Amino acid sequence: MVRMLFVVALCFPACSVNRLAPQGQCEGDELLVGFSAEGEPLCSSFQPAGVSAGEGLLLDPITRVLSFDVAGRALPDRYRSGLEITTNGSGIVTVAAGRARDSTDTLNLELATSAVADRSKKDDRDIPSQADGWNWIWLIGDSTDVAVTRPFISEKETMPNYPTGYDSGRLIGAAYYETVGYRPSRQVMSGNAVQVFQIEKELSADATWSAESRNLDALFVVPPGTLLMTATVQIDGAASADVHFIDELTGVDFVAIAATAGARAQVTAPVNNNIVRVSHDGASDVDMNIACLGYEWGPQEPR
């Protein structure tokens, strides 16, 4: 409580006017900076002069409370800043500079500069073979502060088989290995979610679709834990139709778009247990192609 009130005093007058949040939640980019005398949360679009993201202040990703960034102080649980992941078709995964709290909330992990993990090197992976499929990208560290923090490629989502000298880590992403390398992608934090941009990957080949709904297996396109994907829809031939993306859990429309023959439409679609459920209301069978441009883990990436 003292910490939050101190932050409010520090940023004045750089802060915007504090806003009471009677519903108990801050909105958009607002931050929880304290409480009123009645106990209502105070929210503010805080932007102190001269302080950029990751410098001077820390935002807890769960409570959205600000605290001072002091050397040696524990980062908030599940905190992550930077660590953008890039894959380019080879067996190398590049992770940009950044830092994170480890998955057990006991150790700060930091990359001062970008670093790589090479799937061809045994010390950079715990994967026994070069089989196609999803690999999990970890940032690993040493609680004794001897081994250098670095990226690591694992076949496990929950906990990697740590190489000698390492005992801590944080899952920061996933990459699909196919034939000779990882599918090109860029993975960034956006708010409380990890957004992944990739080359367009076909989810369903051109085919004649009847109007009834069908389930598309998206496991080779998005990793387990994905909630949303950005898809493109293209209808070939003369027919046009409204295409429905259905929430598999509720059975109701999540979104519907009007697809015009010969044109490509883009939509954000739900993913439930790696299933994308689609239907259309065309007057006849429709030739339709659906592809994935990217996906999102959220509200936080898997631990």
Image (cartoon, rainbow, N blue to C red):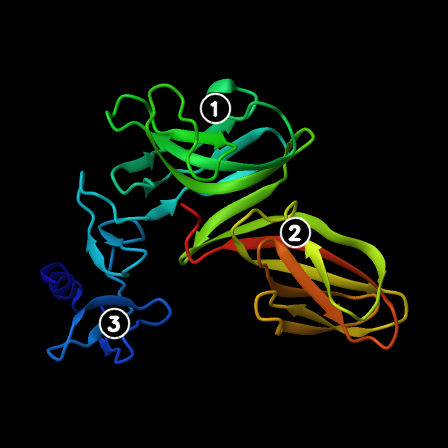
Q: In the rendered image, which quarter is residue 236 located in?
A: bottom right
Left or right, 292 with reference to 29: right
The quadrant of the picture occupied by the C terminus is top left
Q: Nearer the viewer, residue 244 or 293?
A: 244
Q: In the rendered image, which quarter is residue 246 located in?
A: bottom right
Query: Marks 1/3: CA distance?
Result: 44 Å
Query: Marks 1/2: CA distance?
Result: 28 Å
In terms of sequence position, does the residue under pointer 1 or pointer 2 come before the other?
A: 1
Label 1 SS: helix
- Residue 218: which disc? 2
Query: Do the CB atoms of the residues marked 1 and 2 lie less than 8 Å apart?
Result: no
**Kind of residue at disc 1:** Asp
Give neighbour class at mark 2: few <14, some 14-19, many 20+ (Cα, 10 Å).
many
**Kind of residue at disc 3:** Cys
Identify the residue at image location x=16%, y=66%. 8
- Residue 191: which disc? none
The nearer-to-camera label among 1 and 2 is 2
